[in-house]
Amino acid sequence: MSKLELYIDGASKGNPGPSGIGVVIRQNGKTIKEIAQYIGTATNNTAEYTALIFALQESLELRSRGVLVRTDSELLYRQITKVYKVRHPNIAVLYQQAVQLIAHFNDFSIRHIPRAENKEADRLATQAVKDSLKK
């Protein structure tokens, strides 16, 4: 399978508050899967990491050996690229989980993108929160 592009985002109404994740998986420019999932009460950073983990797990299930992650979370980007240290214990657990998943890929890269380029993932994450609040 050719390299997948993963657009990820987390949304939190309050920090912490009701949270959701959005993932858009593309192959050769075509969207092949979208994920909108409510994850309960969480911080925005927890939601961002959870989106990354979901995207990586889904990519492994699709048998991809290479991924390019696109995120508008500067913190997540800088922690994954080891520019920033992970200090918060809850984030450290998620970070370790992400690193273990990343190790399964022959080709992994991550890019920080402006929010304007991440609208689909943002829409999915926000929709997951809104849908949960209607219940």
Image (cartoon, helix red, strand yellow):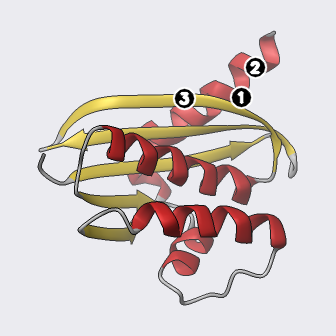
Name the element at disc 2. helix
Position of residue 4 in the picture relative to residue 14 (left or right)? left
Label of residue 36 in the image: 3
Which residue in the rendered view is the most extreme toward the top?
Answer: 135
Q: Is residue 34 above or below residue 85?
A: above
> Which residue bears the numbered disc 2?
132
Residue at 35% of width from left, 50% of height from top? 6
* Crowd tier of the residue under label 3, counting other residues whose Cα lies within 10 Å: few below 14, some 14–19, many 20 or above: many
Name the element at disc 1. helix
Residue at 13% of width from left, 46% of height from top? 1
Dividing the picture into quarters, in which one does residue 113 lie?
bottom left
How many tags in the picture? 3
> Which residue bears the numbered disc 1?
129
Residue at 51% of width from left, 53% of height from top? 52
Q: Is residue 115 above or below residue 132?
A: below
Q: Amino acid at mark 1?
A: Val
Q: Tag 1 or tag 3, which sits nearer the N-term?
A: 3
Q: Nearer the viewer, residue 48 or 57?
A: 57
Q: Amino acid at mark 2?
A: Ser
Name the element at disc 3. strand
Q: Tag 2 or tag 3, which sits nearer the N-term?
A: 3
Residue at 38% of width from left, 52% of height from top? 117
Is residue 113 visible to us here?
no
